[in-house]
Image (cartoon, rainbow, N blue to C red):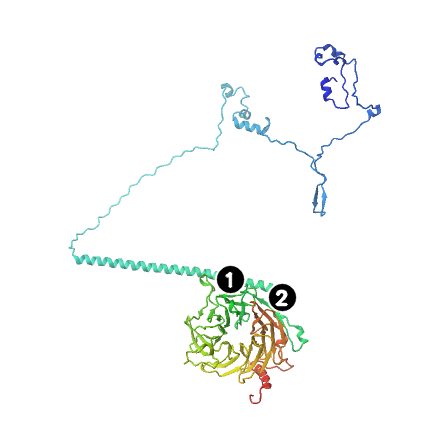
Amino acid sequence: MWVPRSVASSSVPDGFVVVFPSGLAEDEEDGPDQGDGWDEWAQGKALLKPPDQLELTEEELKEEFTKILTANNPHAPQNIVRYSFKERAYKPISGVDQMAVHLVLEGNLLHLDSDEARRQRARQDPTEGEPEEGGEEDRPDSVASKTGKKEQKLTNQFNFSERASQTLNNPLRERSCQTEPPPRCNFSATANQWLIYDAYLEELQKQEKNKEKQKSSSVKKEEDRSQKKQMMTETQSDDFNKVIKVSKIFERMVNQNTFDDIAQDFKYFEDASDELREQEGTLLPLWKFQYDRAKRLSVTALCWNKNYPDLFAVGMGSYDFSKQGHGGVLLLYTLKNPTCPEYVYPTGVGIMCLHIHERLSHLVAVGFYDGCVAVFNLKEEQGGGGGAPQPAYRSTAKAGKHTDPVWQVRWQNDDMDNNHNFYSVSSDGRVVSWTLIKNDLVFSDVIKLSLEGAIPECLEVVEQSSVACGTSFDFHRKIDFLFLVGTEEGKIHKCSKAYSSQFLETYQAHNMAVDAVKWNHFHPKVFMSCSSDWTVKIWDHTIRSPMFTFDLNAAVGDVAWSPYSSTVFAAVTTDGKVHVFDLSVNKYEAICTQPVVAKKSTKLTHIEFNPIYPIVIVGDDRGFVTCLKLSPNLRKKPKEKKGQELPKGPEVEEAKMEKLLSLLREPDNS
């Protein structure tokens, strides 16, 4: 192999030997001119070795070394792992992409023989591809070859076709008609002033008649429009009422599922431990009612609905003078939905008392802190006109409203004209009768309280210091005209509707204000009172001294007789406890004393027995109403002997209470 010396010295790798012919030992410039020396290169061969070449033996030279060239990327990672969901572990990946791309260049060049290049040439020169279709250029006898001109084929791009048709013209027709001329008559008259005047009057009468017709038609149109609007609103309200009814049912179903355990306890649970203790009972907490927008208010009144035993009303307000800016709320809850009240009536003034009509359960009488009384009608739509719901009746300063807070209201029987009426008592010393006549509240003062006695009607001016402040009252269950009034001085006055100038009796009952006075449901002579002096007293209204006195070691907020027994009553105190008494079981202390609030600082304000179910509701000063179930010992009835039926009815309960009182009465009073 002949290689130029300049090339051999620069580009021959190590380990190779280049052999030059002997004629090339001279300068390279003379090489081309010495053409005769090229034949002698094969005669003499000289072996040139680099000075650092290793000396190898024949065996070492003949030894073969195998080298494998691979296309592995030295920069490719070898420790890549992937998570295997099958084996739930990270596994290394064996196959790694070893290809390294050094240059990527996208071009727009096409090969001449490709299909795309042919299509582009055909679009640029339409005549180029035509001879291939028919092959006419290859034929020497074709017209194009004879004339030497190429025929250009025009393609029809719009698929155009031309058609012509001829129609016949319809013949013309002539129509003519002849009419008779209208009849004519000659009229002549003389125009006077009175004739012109009469013509003007006739024209004015015609115009007035036309205006009346237009007015009557417009009135009819307006009536039709109003009727249509009423129909539309009625249909919309009907649809809305249907949606409300369905949503209420659905909400109650959800709440019954949510509070199913409480509902089961309310219906079926009876405390089995009562069998082990003979004279003690317990209270089982059931539902807890709270209205989020009335958290700062206290429960100031409670009342059950007599027609719907699962419905009760709650009055929210405050007994603190400095907290009257929060207003009040009238709420009506049902046991079927403890999460949200059925009716909400916000009031600008705190509610102090309320009472639901026993027969017309949609009428609720309410007394306020500012001395007003009002009647809410639950049948009326709430929030008519976009505002807050307003009471159907409300007293004003002109209509004889009280000047101090109203502490109690009570519905009474209708008067001689079948008008509904209720009574109220206030700190201003007035007991007022309110009558609902059409849309107005008509008042009449029944009696005015004073420290010396009742104030006669003839004395209009009375010193303010001598006025007695009324705090509570209650009407007799059987004697319609008889009622009791408790005062802030601790006295209880027995009054009559017929006598407004004097009291029938005065009892020195308590040392502090009388918070509640309640007649017994069964015995006509027995009533009960409670006060902040820690005592609850039971009276016979024919005797001035109390029959029973119980000290509860805390201020008593309210008391209530049970509707099923004449000897069972309950009281709540400011230390958060409920006390239940049964005089037929224990005449000295309560058979159940149980705290029902979480915090010791919470004060209980009111308590009410349900008229049918063995439960009570208790309100506190934090706005909560708690429902409690009485254990069997708290509503114990005498056991029936075999073969004997025990008498039942109010006469039995009256006899049971009379038996207790007979043991305490003195011989002179019996």
Residue drawn at x 71%, y 11% is: 30
Q: Assign a secondary structure to mark 2.
A: helix
Upstream in sequence: badge 1 or badge 2: 1
Residue at the spot 53% in from the left edge and 28% down from the top edge: 123
Residue 330 in sight in this render:
no
User: x, y (%) of residue 341?
Assistant: 53, 65
Q: In this rendering, does residue 580 appear at all?
A: yes
**In this rendering, is residue 345 above or below 667?**
above
Residue type, label 1: Ile
The residue drawn where x is 44% and y is 60% is 233
In the depicted structure, whether residue 115 falls above or below residue 501: above
Front position in the image: 666 or 51: 51
Q: Is residue 100 left or right of residue 323?
A: right
Instruction: Provide the residue designation for mark 2.
Output: 261
Check the image and name the residue furthest to the bottom. Answer: 668
In the rendered image, which quarter contains the C terminus? bottom right
Residue 280 or residue 140, whichever sits in front = 280
Amino acid type of the residue that numbered disc 2 sits on in the rendered structure: Asp
Q: Is residue 467 above or below residue 71?
A: below
Question: Quadrant where the N terminus lies?
Answer: top right
In this rendered view, identify the residue nearer to me: 253 or 479. 479
Q: Secondary structure at mark 1?
A: helix
Q: Determine which quarter of the picture holds residue 601.
A: bottom right
* Residue 15 position within the rendered picture, expressed as x and y whole percent measured from the top left: 77, 23
Residue 380 in picture, x, y percent from top left: 46, 66
Query: Could you give the CA–CA distance between mark 1 and mark 2, rounded to whole angstroms?
Result: 27 Å
Q: Which residue does the numbered mark 1 point to in the structure image?
A: 244
